Amino acid sequence: MKRKTDAYFYKTYFNIFGMVAAQSLIVFGVNLADSIMLGRYSETAMSGVSLANQIQFLLMCLINGAVNGLVALGSQYWGKKDIKSVKKVFAAAFAVSAFIALVMAVIVGVFPSGVLGALSNKADIVAEGARYISIMVHSYIVFAVSYIVIGLLRAVETVRIGFYTSVMALFINVFLNYALIFGHFGFQELGVVGAAWATLASRVAELIVALIYLFFVDKKLNMRLGDFIAVDRRFLRDYLRAGLPLVGSGGSWGVAMFLQTSIIGRLGAAAIGANAVSAPVFQVVSVLYQSSSSASAVLTAKTVGEGDIPRLNRYVKKMQIIFVVMGIISCLAMLFCRVAIVDFYDVSAETRALSVTFITILSVTVIGSAYEAPCLVGIVSGGGDTKFVFKNDIIFMWCIVLPLSALSAFVFKWPVPVTFFILKMDQILKCAVAAVKVNRYRWIRDLTKERVQVTGSE
């Protein structure tokens, strides 16, 4: 019996991890394609788009928090085979995600230069970023809907469609980038504007395919359009209780990355350029621990919903070993490939040297990221303790990392690599907290228990 459950664990974990990782790599690949092609077109354009993508990253963090809340609560209902409740949780998550995307679209659409000006004091870079983001803002709602739909399917262990839609989006984006940035195949040369239109088109295509699958192919949920807006106040309350801390954690992380970029953006053109080169690398590598988080959250939440705690304990021990191994492999891969990565970009010698240093620093901190993030965002949140991650992020990021990095950059005037390391050191510090928290097993909570009692009594 144990051998059977172990086989199920490895099959399910690596299936979800592999598909989510592949999907996320391709999603980030869309932004990376913009960065690389624009890096060959103009370093100023590349840096401007890098700033604009920080706004996209903030949106992604917020929506990812909403998705994590959907997975934490929805997967527990999935473990109980309660499809009706899964749909109700989705409607609540959809409403929250759409509201977040709409608010951000309005703010960025009305004040594009003002928002980007908070990230850099270089007028030419801000101007290029504003041209890009004025078009990209139209993709925010599209992205949010697409991401929450894929999250719903992930909650019920359907993960391949996210990969397929992302592959299609990447091909569309790369082709249109090449055509519109440089003016090939009879298209006008549009530069940064062309990159924005290419990305917007790929996002729309991704959403269309995801919705077609959800409505006409999927057999687990039998979703209808009305399920998107069938918000039940009771389930909304449950979702907000479980999901808002994760949205807050995602938002806190995204705003912190925004402020980190703002700090780096005031350390000179070379620092901005090096961050533009290293940021996509960080995002691509972060796919590993985000995918680990997704896989562990689904497995943990579903097992809690099934009420099989002894099996959950075995799963947790196995997952921690996987997290450590992935961190070491990621570190070695980044160290080995760092020079080759930087050679993709046509940048100045100073920017090139600083880029190699930044990636070296990231290769060290990724070991911590690969362990602490899936432990806390995956296991602890999936197990029902969704508030802990938010509290932990507030303490480390806002009370330690950001104040120390600001002092390093603007008071002590320490070298740029030192400031960059301080900005990333929380990934190492949080490992001790994660190890203690996960292995005490005080995070196991049945988020559906109250709702089951209510519906059972009606």
Image: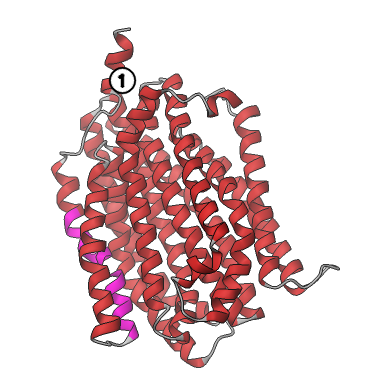
Can you say whether 327 is above or below 229 in the image?
below
Residue extending farthest right: 186
Residue extending farthest bottom: 349
Q: Position of residue 163 (x, y in %)?
A: 56, 47
Give the amino acid at mark 1.
Answer: Arg
Can you say whether 3 is above or below 138 in the image?
above
Q: Is residue 287 left or right of residue 177?
A: left
Can you say whether 358 is above or below 439 in the image?
below
Residue behind mark 1: 451
Residue drawn at point x = 45 percent, y = 63 percent: 283
* Quadrant location, the C terminus: top left
The reply to whether residue 184 is visible in this rendering is: yes
Write the start and end of the magenta stretch as one range. Answer: 416-433
Which element is circle 1 on?
Answer: helix
Residue drawn at point x = 31 percent, y = 36 percent: 242
> What kind of secondary structure does the magenta stretch mostly adopt?
helix
Question: Which one is in front, 395 or 217?
Answer: 395
Residue extending farthest top: 458
Residue drawn at point x = 30 percent, y = 71 percent: 423
Q: Is residue 357 left or right of residue 192?
A: left
Question: Within the magenta stretch, is there residue 198?
Answer: no
